[in-house]
Image (cartoon, rainbow, N blue to C red):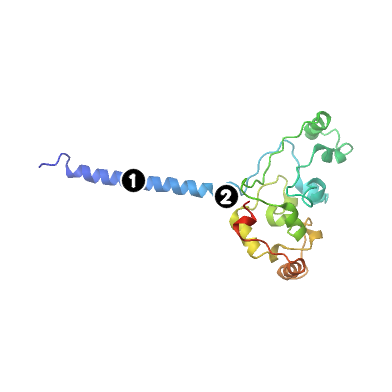
Amino acid sequence: MAAIFPKSSDIILKVLGAVIGLGAVSTIGAYVYFSYPTVIDTGYQPEQPVAYSHKLHAGQLGLNCFYCHYTVYRGAYAAIPGTEICMGCHQKVKDKSPRLELVRQSYETGEAIPWKKIHVLPDYVYFNHRAHVTAGVSCVSCHGRIDQMVEVRQEKPLNMAMCLQCHRDPAPNVRPAELVTQLDWVPDRDPRVIGSEIIAQKHLNPPTNCSGCHR
């Protein structure tokens, strides 16, 4: 029986199928790559409603992280400071600055400033700030040198690989608890040795099983 289509059509169909297949693989690969937390989240730096400089406040002025994020020592979450915290200083410091107009309005009306959250973990991940801070894990380990950032960005991926790496080998990230907010701290000896000593003293044993972070 004679072929309905010439042999050249078969070749064209095979080439077309191969092109479509490669296109599908490339699309899936690009989706996986750009969906990976390291690519999506690291470097995220939204524009905030008020131009607050961490480099000025935490760096040059030496304002302690706990002054604004006051819940990290006793709660699971890091509090976004209320306007009252800001006005504790700015009722007298730069109290007429146009850059702080939204802060003054918030203080007068009681309406919260719509700050944009930068470091966001998935809902299925449990992270307790208090457990880490009291163990001696510095803000630097997860957030980087915030005191050098004019506008805060997400510097670390905060993905499961990062967490597991630290839980399996926590010593490099553990320091005396009273130094967790001293972001420019320089140890006087091997930080791994210091961390190992604190881990032994406090009997720290970070979980590496699934239920440690997924509850």
Identify which amino acid the numbered label 1 is placed on.
Val
| Few, some or many residues within 10 Å of mark 1 (<14, 14–19, 20+) | few
Whole-percent x, y for residue 10 in the image: 22, 44
Measure the alpha-carbon separation of dots 2 and 1.
29 Å
The 10 Å Cα crowd at callout 2, few under 14, some 14 to 19, many 20 or more, is some
Q: Position of residue 27 (x, y in %)?
A: 43, 45
Instruction: Name which quarter of the figure residue 196 lies in.
Output: bottom right
Q: So how many labels did they put on this image?
A: 2
Residue farthest left in this picture: 1
Secondary structure under tag 2 reads helix
**Which residue bears the numbered disc 2?**
37
Q: In the drawing, does residue 9 fall left or right of residue 75?
A: left
Q: Quadrant of the N terminus?
A: top left
- How far from the left and from the top, in percent, is residue 65? 79, 50
* Residue 113, percent from left and from top: 75, 34
Residue found 76% across the figure and 67% down from its top: 198
Asked whether the residues under the numbered discs 2 and 1 touch, taking CB atoms below 8 Å apart as contact, a structural biologist would say: no
**Most foreground residue, 1 or 141:** 1
Horizontal relation, residue 85 to residue 23: left or right? right
Residue that extends furthest to the top in the rendered view of this protein: 109
Q: Which residue is mark 1?
A: 19
In the depicted view, which residue is nearer to us: 210 or 138? 210
Sequence-wise first label, 2 or 1: 1
Image point 18% across, 45% down: which residue? Answer: 7
Callout 1: SS? helix
Q: Amino acid at mark 2?
A: Pro
From this view, report whether residue 181 is shown above or below residue 10.
Answer: below
Q: Residue at x 76, y 44 (%)?
A: 79
- Residue drawn at the location 70% of the way across and 62% of the way down: 173
Left or right placement of residue 72 versus residue 153 in this view: right
Disc 2 or disc 1, which is closer to the eye?
2
